[in-house]
Image (cartoon, grey):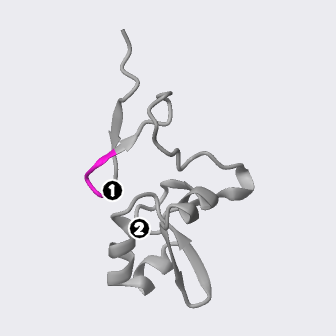
């Protein structure tokens, strides 16, 4: 028997949906096409769908640029030092 509700660890120490699991009723932040993809400035290298993150409110605007996050915990971290995290995307 398989468990469709498997979770993986995320940056904010909560369970995040496993993109390989089906039927779990959770949004997949990796669901966009290549032009929709970016990475999280807080968890460097974590892929994020811009469209899905924006719909979930997982973004911030800083110095004229929009930054997208992989989970809800990254927004407050970004807010604590936006210049530091924006530099991760340069």
Q: Position of residue 18 (x, y in %)?
A: 43, 36
Secondary structure beneath dot 2 equals loop
- Residue 35 left/right relative to 88: right
Q: Nearer the viewer, residue 45 or 40?
A: 40
- Pick whichever of labels 1 and 2 is earlier in the sequence: 1
Which residue, as the protein is rendered here, is positioned at the far bottom?
63
Q: Would residue 59 appear left or right of 4 to someone viewing this image?
A: right
Q: Residue at position x 46%, y 28% from top?
A: 21
Horizontal and vertical percent position of residue 11 = 33, 56
Q: How many marks?
A: 2
Question: How packed is label 1: few (under 14 Cα within 10 Å), some, or many (20 or more)?
Answer: some
Q: Residue furthest front?
A: 25
Contact, mark 1 vs mark 2 (Cβ under 8 Å) = yes
Q: Is 14 colored magenta in this rendering?
A: yes
> Which portion, as a residue range, is magenta?
11-15
- The numbered dot on residue 11 is 1
**Residue at which label 2 appears:** 42
Residue 1 percent across, percent down from the top left: 36, 8
Q: In which quarter of the view is residue 63 placed? A: bottom right
Q: CA distance from mark 1 to mark 2?
A: 9 Å
Please tell me whether residue 57 is drawn above or below residue 12 in the rendered image: below
- Residue 90 seen by the camera: no
SS of the residue at dot 1? loop
Q: Which mark is residue 37?
A: none
């Amino acid at each position: 028997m398989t468990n469709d509700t498997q979770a993986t660890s995320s940056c904010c120490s909560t369970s995040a949906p496993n993109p390989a699991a089906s039927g779990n009723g959770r949004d997949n932040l990796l669901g966009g096409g290549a032009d929709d993809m970016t990475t999280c400035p807080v968890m460097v290298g974590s892929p994020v769908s811009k469209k899905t993150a924006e719909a979930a409110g997982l973004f911030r605007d800083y110095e004229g640029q929009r930054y997208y996050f992989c989970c809800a915990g990254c927004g407050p971290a970004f807010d604590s030092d936006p210049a530091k995290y924006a530099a991760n995307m340069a």
